[in-house]
Image (spheres, rainbow, N blue to C red):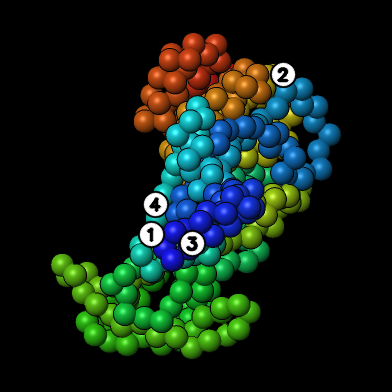
Amino acid sequence: MFNKIYNDVRRSIQKNFSFIIYLLLIFIILCPVNYYIITGGGTFDAKSRVSIKTDNKIKGSFNMAYVSEIKGTLFTYLLSYIVPHYERESIDDYKANENEDLNDVEFRNKLWLNEANNSSIYVAYTKASKDISVKRSNTYIFFVDEKSKSNLKVGDEILSIDGKSVTDLDSLKKLVSNYSDGDKLKIKVKRNEKILDKYAYIYEESGVKYIGISIMEDIAYKTSPKVAFKFKKSESGPSGGLIMTLQIYNMLVKEDITKGRKIVGTGTIDKEGNVGEIDGVKHKLRGAVKDKADIFLVASGRNYKEALKEKKINKYKIKIIGVKTFDEALEKLK
C-alpha cells in the first residue's frame, strides 16, 4: 500500500515537474520581503523639475543625484548577495517606530520634499533680492511617538488645539506648556479631506510637557517671477535642497554660476541656507561619475569624507567640494 502511494506521488511530480518549477519561480520573483533593495544611483537636470520664466543663458547644468531603490522580493533579496552595488535596507529602518506603516513613511518623505522646495525658494529669492512673501501655511503631523496618548495620525493637518492655532513647533511647545500633566486637549484636524475632532493627553518627562507629536510647517510662497515645481510622484525626500536652491538662484541672476560645467550634488537646505547631510552618498557619487559630471557638491563633514574615500577607492577623477552653507557653495563654485 505504501509503495503504491509513493509511486503515485512520484509519477505525479514527474508529470507536473515543469509546472511546479514554474510556480516556484513565480513565488521567488513575487514574494515580498521586508527590505528595499538599493540598486545604484543616477542624476537628472534640476531644470527639468522647476519652471521660472527667464531670459538668462545657462551653458552648464545643476543636476540632482538620486538613489535607485525597489521594494524587495525574495528574488531581488537573493540577487543582492551576488550583484555588485546591490544593497539591502530594512523597511523597518525607514519607520520611526513600530506603529508606523509605509503610508506614514511615504507621507513624511513627501513633506520633506515640500519643505526642501520651500526652503530652496526662500533662500534663492532672498539671495537674489527678488520679491517673495508667504501665501499660505499649513501644519502637518509628521511623527507620532509611541508614548503619545492620542488618536492622532501621521498626515493629519492640525487646524486648532483647544481653539488656538498652531503654526510651528515653537507655538506647539508654548501652548502645551500652559497645561498640566494628564490634561486632555481637544484637537481639530483635517484628515483625508474631512474635518475631525481628535484628542491628546499631556504627559510630563524631566519637567517638560509633551503630547507626543512632531509637526512640520508646509509653506506656499508668492514670488516674482513665479516659480513652479514638476516633481514625479515617485520622487520624495529632502536631499535635493542644495542643488534646487542653486538651480533657482541661477535662473534669477544674470551671471551663470555653472560656467559651462556639469555640477551634481546632494544635501538638504534650511531657510537659513545651512546645508545638511544625507544618506547614500557613495551611490550618488557613483551616479555622478557615470553621468560624467565635472563637480560633485556635498555637505561638509561625514558626507564629504565618505565621498573622498569612495573617490580614492575607485580612482574617480571628479572634483568633490564640501560645503556647509549656500553662500559657501556659491563662493567655491566661483
Query: What residue is pinned by disc 2?
Result: 260
Element at badge 2? loop
Q: Picture coordinates of residue 291 (x, y %)?
A: 66, 23
Label 3 or label 2, whichever lies nearer to me, is 3
Q: Quadrant of residue 67?
A: top right
Name the residue located 54 percent from the left edge and 60 percent from the top edge: 8
Label 4 or label 3, whichever lies nearer to me, is 3
Q: Residues within 10 Å of mark 2 (few under 14, many from 20)?
A: few
Q: Amino acid at mark 3?
A: Lys
Q: Which mark is residue 4?
A: 3
Disc on the earlier residue, 1 or 2: 1
**Real-space Cα distance between discs 4 and 2?**
40 Å
**Real-space Cα distance between discs 4 and 3?**
53 Å
Q: Residue furthest left?
A: 206
Query: What residue is pinned by disc 1?
Result: 96
Name the residue located 56 percent from the left edge and 15 percent from the top edge: 318
